[in-house]
Amino acid sequence: MPGSRAQTILPRAASRTPTMDTRIQAADEAALLQASRLLHADQLVAFPTETVYGLGGNALSTRAIDRIYAAKGRPRFNPLIVHIPEVAAALDLVTDWPDAAVQLAQRFWPGPLTLVLRRAPSVPDAVSAGRPTLALRVPHHPVALRLLAACGLPLAAPSANRSQGISPTRAEHVAASLRAADVPLILDGGPCQHGIESTVLDLTSSPPRLLRPGAIPLLLLRQTLAERGLAVAAPPPVSDDAPLAINESDPASPGQQRRHYAPRTPLTLLPSFDEDALLALPAPRGLLGHLDVPALSAHCAVVERLPDDAPGYAADLYAALHRLDDVTPRLASIAVLPLPYGRAQTDDLWQAIRDRLLRAAAPPT
Ligand code: AMP
Ligand code: MG
């Protein structure tokens, strides 16, 4: 499990605002009971998963679903992922459970893999933004599983943050992003293990195809299905001009908007380790990366050093972005060091990280 090895170098002048919020509660029996009551009353509860914190509501209630979209300011065309406690619960929610789903669920659930299947008529249109499909996963986090068991409901749960913003990997991130009137309870499960969203695989197309790179490498999905003679469609080739998942015009892949996961402070992916690119950005600057580059750090007010392995980098990425965004006085720019070149071209998890950073760097719409 990736640990929290990020290192922050903060100048004396800079400080951060501490967050204290009574909505944040340890997930004991009393809190789970309260959560269950709220969910049965169509209210929302934030809870930890192994990827990021989710904003949960009853997936069978259009009132709860409407509240999720409103609390996040999420565009109504972007469908929600539904969380279930075990594979058997999927069978009530979809009309078709193909062989590929059997294989993948057996190997990767509970875990950060989301499968898109054909939606059963009993599930409200609103949860899938009117699509005939439904995205499902069984999360691998003890608090999420206890909550699902306690309430006995399938929970629609997108990331618990305002739309387009940085995803939350700590309870405090949720409290800072969503209003108490919208989210009366935040179950605390500490930092999220993966820190990056689930991999989304569409099983309604033939062959299945990747809609979002994420915590489970595509290579593993391919291997699992190949053992049964099944294929996965090749994702578009990756190059700097055509990054893997910037495909917002693709109607099969809703919600993959260009700008996403973005801090308020403008973020730039440096094209090289040259000082010039960094100096072109306005000061005070924050620097984020997996290497110590003194020539660049010298021009930055704050430096966030991340682990140089992909699981460690992913686990700390959003927390580091939150910290940079919260520095007082505010930074004028955040620069991100180039990702490890060879590995970032070929490794699925580095690709998922790159996807998030490219979206975080996209200008506001
Ligand atoms: P989020 O929960 O915010 O991490 O985003 C959920 C992602 O799952 C979206 O970006 C969608 O691309 C994907 N998704 C959810 N439901 C569907 C669906 N029915 N069809 C295709 N993609 C979906
Ligand atoms: Mg999200």
Image: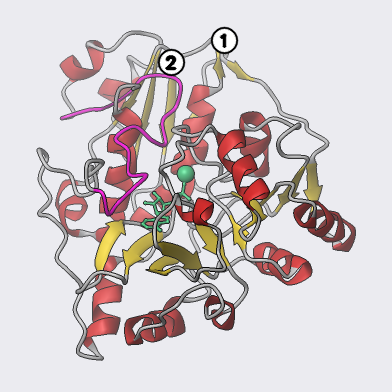
40 or 46, nearer to the observer: 40
Which quarter of the rendered picture does the C terminus lie within?
top left
143 or 330, nearer to the observer: 143
Say which amino acid is labelled 2.
Ala
Q: Which residue is mark 2?
A: 301
Whether tag 2 and tag 1 are in contact, CB under 8 A, the answer is yes
> Which structural element holds mark 2?
loop
In space, the residues marked 2 and 1 are separated at their CA atoms by: 9 Å
Residue reaching furthest to the bottom: 228
Q: Is residue 33 left or right of residue 276?
A: right
Residue 335 location, x and y as percent?
32, 24
Say which amino acid is labelled 1.
Ala
* Residue 51 visible in the shown view: no
Q: What segment carries the magenta color?
A: 251-271
> Ligand 2 within 8 A of label 2's CB?
no
Seen in the picture, residue 88 relative to 146 is either above or below; the reply is below
Quarter holding residue 283: top left
